[in-house]
């Protein structure tokens, strides 16, 4: 028995004649490329800094289909065009004896973006923007 998941070529292309709907698998199964990296720096003993980077690729494998009722072109669920996302985040921590003060800034550049899942679904009601810049302050005590 051949399962479509077992008979895939590059980027989720079904290559088995026994799999129905040969072609690209939807973005719900094969998301676009995702790259992450971070750099850590400790300028002094009690201070640590970390910069995070995130980048996602493009996935544009499907054509919209015409809805027979409305005659409008729509992407099937999971087949929407995914545009790239690039983000930077920063995290810092300073140790003061038994206390540690932390500061985090997610989406440091306040980039406007739509999360991959929001883009894939290709439905207006579910096309929601991702979070803007978020700042987190923390205080912890170690005993």
Image (tube, grey):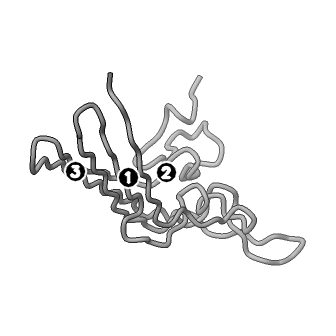
Q: Nearer the viewer, mark 1 or mark 3?
A: 3
Provide residue 139's location: percent of width, then percent of height: 39, 41
Judged from this view, the residue extending furthest toward the front is 97
Residue 24 rendering spot, x and y as whole percentages: 53, 52
**Coordinates of residue 126 in the picture (x, y in percent):** 70, 61
Q: Is residue 68 above or below residue 44?
A: below
Residues at badges 2 and 1 in contact (C-beta under 8 Å)?
Answer: yes
User: Residue extending furthest left?
Assistant: 44
Please state which of residues 29 and 46 is positioned toward the viewer in this rendering. Answer: 46
Q: Closer to us: mark 3 or mark 2?
A: 3
Q: Which residue sits at x=72%, y=64%?
A: 123
Of the pair 32 and 41, the residue shown nearer to us: 41
Q: Please tell me which residue lies in front, 130 or 8.
A: 130
Name which residue lies at 64% across and 65% down.
128
Q: Identify the residue position indicated by label 1 in the image.
A: 34
Q: Where does the image place residue 51, in percent across and percent down from the top left?
A: 26, 55
Residue closest to the eye, 128 or 94 = 94
The Cα–Cα distance between marks 2 and 1, rounded to whole angstroms, is 8 Å
Q: CA distance from mark 1 to mark 3?
A: 23 Å
Disc nearer the start of the sequence (3/2) = 2
Left or right placement of residue 122 versus residue 87 in this view = right
Furthest-right residue in this view: 69
At 53% across and 39% down in the image, what residue appears? Answer: 16
**Above or below: residue 130 compared with residue 15:** below
In the rendered structure, find residue 49 and report the number of the disc placed on it: 3
| Disc number for residue 31 | 2
């Amino acid at each position: 028995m051949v399962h479509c998941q077992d008979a895939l070529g590059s980027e989720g292309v079904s290559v088995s004649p026994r799999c129905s709907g040969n072609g690209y698998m939807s973005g719900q199964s094969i998301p676009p490329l995702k790259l992450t990296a971070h750099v850590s720096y400790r300028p002094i003993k009690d201070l640590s800094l970390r910069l995070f980077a995130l980048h996602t690729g493009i996935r544009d494998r499907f054509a919209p289909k015409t809805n027979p009722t409305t005659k409008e072109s729509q992407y099937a669920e999971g087949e929407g065009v995914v545009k790239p996302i690039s983000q930077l985040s920063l995290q810092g921590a300073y140790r003061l004896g038994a206390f540690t003060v932390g500061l985090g800034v997610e989406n440091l550049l306040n980039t406007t973006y739509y999360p991959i899942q929001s883009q894939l679904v290709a439905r207006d009601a579910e096309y929601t923007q991702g979070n803007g810049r978020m700042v987190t302050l923390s205080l912890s005590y170690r005993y």
